[in-house]
Amino acid sequence: MLVEKYAQEVSQILAKYPPEERRAAVMPLLYLVQRDQMFIDRKSMDEVASILGISTTDVASVVGFYTLFHDKKGGKFYIQVCTDLPCALRGADKFMEQLCERLGIEPGQTTPDGLFTVEPVMCLAACDRAPMFQLQSAEGLEYHENQTVENALSLIEGLRAQIAHKGGLKRRQDHE
Amino acid sequence: MNNESAGAGFKHILLRHRDHPDLDNLEIYRQKGGYRAFENVVTSMQPEEVTEIVKASGLRGRGGAGFPTGLKWSFIDNNAWPHYVVANADESEPGTFKDREIMEGNPFQFLEGLAICAYAIQANTSYIYLRGEFWKIAENLDRQIEALKMASLLGENLFKTGFSLNIYTHLGAGAYICGEETALLESMEGKLGQPRLRPPFPPSFGLFGKPTVINNVETLANVPLIIEHGADWYRGIGTKMSPGPKIFSLSGRVNRPGNYELPLGTTFRELIFEHGGGIPDGGSIKAIMAAGASSALIPADDRALDTPMDYESVPSLGAQLGSASVIIIDDTVDIPWLINKTNHFFKHESCGKCTPCREGTYWMTKISERIVSGNATFQDVDLLHEVASQIQGKCLCALGEFAVESVLSGINHFSPDFQAATNGTKST
């Protein structure tokens, strides 16, 4: 998939590192896969491994170690709420609890339409603007800061409407 | 948003974008004097001279350890090549959000500092390791790096001197431990982010086994102005042992959280009450964590509040300045709840390589969960203290050591909170 679909990106990534150290490209290549399909399947791990001349086990261990990589299909969108100490001091736990309640899911679960997975994550370097979350999707990551449950729900509704009307994702404006 | 200056006439040096809009535009940055320092060092100075100026300035690493920056550069092994510079932009300490603001608002000052460091150690390739969540910042940096190439400020044969430099961004993928510099190197090499045994240290054996200098974003952002104005100018800011300005990330139970650039040596009281506007809802301050979640809890008495925030004074309070991520705890906060939060963080972020940290953070979390759920006796508090003491001093890297700071200081200084949580009168 990678080599046919993203030949140019793959060679640009490999060019960043000394040829004898191409293993360094494993995380950038995994990001390419994940942006394409929102999770990393076994076949893609095999492909990344063969591009880099390392074993699939090495690739899988990287996927397993780092929390931004997903090896299972989740929602189209991940709403990742920081609930670490500084955010919790500004009401982040309550924010996530109420958001999940309104969506009818538990933290870590995906909404029944398969679109949104809400989960707690560790510090996102936005402690002064909590409650906050990052929205992870095929388009990358977006920070949403100084949130209320109502703000978050209207963002979610907007994304739902977009998916329903256009049958897919359209490049959105930066919300920050 | 926030922040007038501290002291008479103190101006932003690192957060200059707050005074000069559009500083993330290369043209504007150059109009304000940007890239004169880089051109100056490449065209008219020997690499060692640059290192000497940084040494003389007294600049200390802003990532947390406070190690003298020029000294670090001087350790580079000139018998092995190539050399690398890696900028640590993994900013992941709960309570820290300063590097993000520099890279968003004043990116060229950071990139220029990185380029000057590369010249000083004669590296032709430099990487910026950003936490994966800074995806958008990395995209912007890629564009800014392109702009620098177009302006012939990066690339081959710079200023026709024969010196070449390329800078690349590299995204991590969500692991606190990668802020530890040897774990960062492992991660950059495409492996699990687990710390290396040291020695050897990165200036002799770093990225891809080559001599490498790793500096924090804020550290590097200081460098262009040190070159431009000189070491004496820089030493005129801050204290004798901790010269220069520092960005204090203020968060928690305070009216005006945010980044405040102030001279090192500013007191906690000034930061919290003058700049931060004090405690919300008429509450009173209970404790301070000066170095984010890695910090010991400092009981916020008058002595603590009047202590200067610099590398040499904060240790007198049994704590460290670290990356100066100051989390404010007020009297609405129960300390057992707090340490349960930090325990969860360190348990999640432990890389699993060394046993005291991997197992210890797990057991500490089990016990603190029991305490906050109201199912513990005070013997559990003693047990928690004992487990934490067993971890201390036995870990491969600082993460494990940091994990016990809030636990031990919390139990030592705030025993009544633990009494209340374990005698059945409270079940928070």
Image (cartoon, coloured by chain):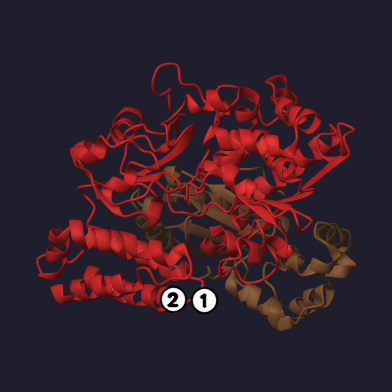
Chain colours: A brown, B red
Q: CA distance from mark 2 to mark 1?
A: 7 Å
The residue indicated by pointer 1 is B353
Q: Residue at x 51, y 42 (%)?
A: B60
In the shown orientation, is residue B96 left or right of residue B327? right
Helix, strand or loop under label 1: loop
> Label 2: chain?
B
Instruction: Please name the amino acid that badge 2 sits on.
Output: Arg
The part of the image, by quadrant, that contains residue A16 is: bottom right
Give the vertical position of B51 relative to B9 (above or below).
Answer: below
Instruction: Please name the amino acid that badge 1 sits on.
Output: Lys
In the shown orientation, is residue B417 left or right of residue B347? left
In the shown orientation, is residue B300 left or right of residue A51? left
| Classed neighbour count for the residue bearing mark 2: other residues with Cα under 10 Å, few (<14), some (14–19), many (≥20) | many
> Label 1: chain?
B
Q: Residue at x 28, y 37 (%)?
A: B307
Is residue B273 in view? yes
Residue A11 point in image, percent of width and height: 87, 61
**Numbered mark located on residue B25 in the image:** none
| Classed neighbour count for the residue bearing mark 1: other residues with Cα under 10 Å, few (<14), some (14–19), many (≥20) | some
Residue A37 point in image, percent of width and height: 72, 68
Helix, strand or loop under label 2: helix
Residue A8 point in image, percent of width and height: 88, 59
Circles 2, 1 touching at the beta carbon (< 8 Å): yes
**Numbered mark located on residue B358 in the image:** 2
Residue B107 point in image, percent of width and height: 65, 37
Q: Quadrant of the C terminus of chain B?
A: bottom left
Of callouts 2 and 1, the N-terminal one:
1
Task: Tell which of A15 and A79 is nearer to you.
Answer: A15
In the shown orientation, is residue B288 left or right of residue B153? left
